[in-house]
Amino acid sequence: MTTLVDGSAPQTRSERPGHVQLSDRAKAERILGWKLAGPAFVIMLAVTAYPILNAVWLSLYSYRLTDPSARKFIFLNNYVVVLTDGLWWGAVLNTVIITVFTVVVELVVGMALAMIMNKIVIPRRTLRTVVLIPYAIITVVSAFAWRFAFAVDTGFINHWMHTLTFGAFSETYDWFGGHWSAIFAICISEIWKTTPFMSLLLLAGLAQVDSSLEEAAQVDGATFWQRLFKVVLPNMKAAIMVALLFRTLDAFRIFDAVFVMTGGSQDTSSVSLVAYNQTISRVEVGMGSAVSVLLFLAVLGISALFVKGFKVDLSQVKGE
Amino acid sequence: MESHVSDKTRTWLGVVSIPIIIYTLIPILWILSLSLKSTATLADGKFIPHEISWDNYRLILTGDARGLFLPALANSVVVCLVATFISVVLAMFAAYAIARLEFPGKKLILTTALAVSIFPVISLVTPLYNLWRTIHLFDTQIGLIIPYLSLTLPLAIWTLAAFFKQIPWEMEQAAQVDGATAWQAFRKVIVPLASPGVFTTAIITFFTAWNDFVFAISLTSERARTVPAALAFFTGASQFQQPTGAIAAAAVIVTIPVVILVLLFQRRIVSGLTSGAVKG
């Protein structure tokens, strides 16, 4: 598509007489380009760059909203407090565990789902429609649905587990009463909600793998797993890495499900929830800003790791 | 592609799709079932309610919880529609320029959009909370619409830029050869061609705004609260009663429009979600 546009455009221009006119046209195109794209660009910067710079500045102060007169410049002291606090590291650990667990499961299940959707014939359209529903459901609604499903009183999961294990699993098991079981419930809600999106991204990548390659391997006697790992996956590596990068960053920001399902009890706080509690619940704006800046740096670090470490080609991303 | 699939595989895949569909629908069916149960049978653990009760819907639509739910629904609709509208209009111009025109800084705009979209939302909350309180935007609809642009605008730019790259631009050139200016060509030729992409982008953008919880819960306290935030603050009819049924009913109400949109525009939404993400 792009080559077609690029190939034909200069041709049309060179047909126009005179060099002066051409450069005028190019100049006009430049101005029009920025006139059209400028407002969106400026607004994107205004709603993100300004607040984050403001956060960096606020993080250097001891500043509690209820007591503005006591505001004091304390340089990096907020960061020292945060980074030496067990609460922060506990939240980091929770966030990393949730991120790694959900992204790995989503990748495996999403890939299986994508392969099924790629080959399926009979309920093709139904399957693709149904799979879109979790993507479109509000995260808070998904979190409530799973909270109610895991709950002892309003749930069904305990009843099913009880039946499936022939009574070995207690019907009154309190999922939200323990750290790991609560984390597991949060992960299930996240996985349910975002696997379909992952599978659609992978399906788009899968559709670009030349099927004749796979058939050639099949003729040569390669097994299903050999074809998958030696032919299909290497040929869609770019799509997989992009999907992984986006999901990892998204999972690392986890807030909604934790807030709704546990509210941070049983030490299940995520990094985002810690930032929220500092700023909104405790109105410690300085401390909250420090946590926000640290989270921002963590996201930058993950992106850098993917781009430099795993060589994710971001020019592949989003149509460029 | 399908022709290479044998009959045996075809049947097998058809069978496999059934558990997938069930898995996908289970939490939704569960919340639907809870919303239709009476308080007495709420904890019976059954998927099919013993007896259908509309009490929960009555509670949030005409009963005591009306004051919590209906204003939140109105806020959600207004805030998300306005944020979607602003983003799609701005993104339309930007994406046209990116897909069509040659100008320095194109890459910068796309990179910025990418960077903004991976931004941890909560990092924006602290400074905005402080600023909004100072300039009296806290707990207002405008105070939500502005930060929503950080979620919706980059998404809209990418999705639209991908759509716009697939448009047959020769038609625009033909119009320009016939004497139309660049602006006229854009308005008269490209806009009609681009409207399906614009429409799809609007749906995806709307979903994103509709889904927001972080901004809604942090930057509002009562008047401008949207549905996701209101759900988290629902209380039962009395302090001894769990709000489970009311939350379930409210969740069903806000889920229905989304499911209808998905059913109607499945194919377009999929192409919108993926066309931008993977080179197509």
Image (spheres, grey):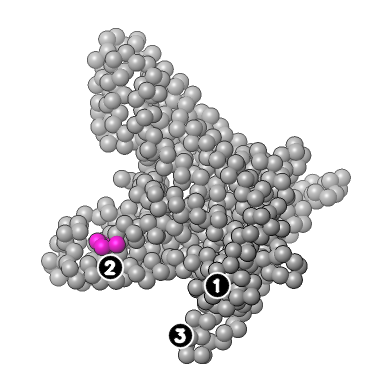
Residue under label 2: B14
Camera-nearest label, 1 or 2: 1
- Kindly state the secondary structure of the residue where label 2 is placed: helix
Question: For the stretch drawn in magenta, what is the main secondary structure?
Answer: loop
Q: Residue B148 in the image: x percent, y percent?
A: 58, 43
Say which of A116 and A280 sits in front.
A116
Chain holding disc 3: A
- Kindly state the secondary structure of the residue where label 1 is placed: loop
Q: Are marks 1 and 2 on the same chain?
A: yes
Estimate the spatial distance between the alpha carbons at disc 2 and disc 3, rounded to whole Å.
Answer: 25 Å
Q: Residue A39 in the image: x percent, y percent?
A: 53, 29
Q: Residue A184 in the image: x percent, y percent?
A: 54, 73
Say which of B59 and A306 sits in front.
B59
Chain holding disc 1: B
Residue under label 3: A164
Q: Residue A296 in the image: x percent, y percent?
A: 59, 51
Q: Is residue B100 magenta?
A: no
**Residue at 32% across / 13% down in the picture?**
B179
Q: Which residues are magenta?
A: A119-123
Crowding at label 3, few (<14), some or many (≥20) Cα neighbours within 10 Å?
Answer: few
Residue under label 1: B51
Relative vertical location of residue B209 with respect to residue A46 in this rendering, above or below: below
**Residue at 44% across / 22% down in the picture?**
A32
Relative vertical location of residue B84 with respect to residue B40 in this rendering, above or below: above
**Residue at 17% across / 68% down in the picture?**
B7
